Amino acid sequence: MYIFSGSIFLNCGLITGVNSNRRRKGLDLFSATRNNDFKRMNSQNNEVYKALQCIIEDLSELRALCGPHDAYLKQMSRILGTKIFTRGNELILVDATREQEEQFQSMISYLQKLHRDGRTIDRWIIDTLKDIIATKPKDQVSGYMDIAVHIPSGPQIYPKNARQSEYLKQMDEKDIVFGIGPAGTGKTFLAVAKATEEILQHRRHKLILTRPVVEAGENLGFLPGDLTQKISPYLRPLYDALEMLMPLSTIRKFEESGVIEVAPLAYMRGRNLSNCFIILDEAQNTSREQMKMFLTRMGSGSKMIINGDITQIDLPKPGFSGLKHVMNILHTIPEIGFSYFTSRDVIRHPVIQKIIDAYEAHQERKES
């Protein structure tokens, strides 16, 4: 349960709690109830800051909302552009505009909902709320945050930012989805998670993992082993994701029975892939001809996810990338979705976002 009520901050830094039925001499306070549980106190005295107070009755919930060393409160304070303090079991927003108060109320409400639903609150969740609240009507935020991947007898995968939410939603609604953006944004992991969900729930009968084999100084034919053993090192990121989602014994069983198939992109030619979930990774290294060939393999009841980073093209002529080509010619087809990730969507170590920004800035200076 949460209750918002009036509170007063004095310029000297002292905090004075004020009930809605009390008045302090000389401050001329009044309260007005709005939005069910939310109450706000104003003052006509310029020396008193208006504040919004949130009482969290569940202390474990309060700890989850504040984060380690109040890290999440500091993050919310930066996002809102105002100050948030704690006092006992209270969260206090100071001298905020009406818009900031509403955003604060929305963020706290949805974080409480997520905590009660068993989700772990982290900095990415708060960034998600920031982006979604800024771009979505209030009545859409809750449903937008409810998008998830449900692995039978396994983990539940939730988006860590607004872009991931959009990406998962497109996978539900579109037949072909392109995930385009830098490394570390979760494109591959979410695609594998969605594929795992659909295979284990028997909505698709096969998972096909593929990628173009384009590596500097190494040729596929000189690697030891059979075809699967040759291609497996190139698909290691996909296997890493699979191993996080289901037991290794299940993966091996699916490989032996053909439910999971790995293949180089060149081996897709001439096939008709029906009722399959197909993931093409590192798609920036496909040629235009390869991309067209791959897309036209799709049979009835299948879904394709194509991921890549157009800033990491290893082709001799980067301008001939099949991924860059389709971005310009397929965006008007309603059955095809595009999700564009940026450095702001990186969910690995925070320094990766800065590294990507530095490289992009260097490239811009080089081209200008």
Image (tube, helix red, strand yellow):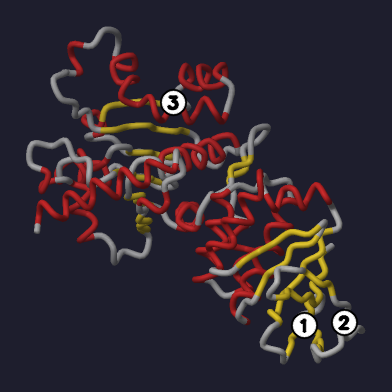
Q: Which numbered disc covers residue 239?
A: 3
x and y, in percent, of residue 74 in the image: 59, 56
The residue depicted at 82 percent of the width and 64 percent of the height is 55
Q: Is residue 118 above or below residue 135?
A: above
Looking at the image, residue 31 sits to the left or right of residue 193; the answer is right
Residue 276 visible to an observer of this rendering: no
Which quadrant, please, contains the C terminus? Answer: bottom left
x and y, in percent, of residue 246 in the image: 58, 27
Residues under numbered marks 1 and 3 in contact, where contact means CB atoms less than 8 Å apart: no
The residue depicted at 37 percent of the width and 32 percent of the height is 209
**Residue wearing tag 2:** 20
**Residue wearing tag 1:** 41
Residue 57 visible to an observer of this rendering: yes
Judging depth in this view, the residue of 242 and 79 nearest the camera is 79
The residue depicted at 34 percent of the width and 20 percent of the height is 232
Mark 2 or 1, nearer chain start: 2
| SS under mark 2 | loop
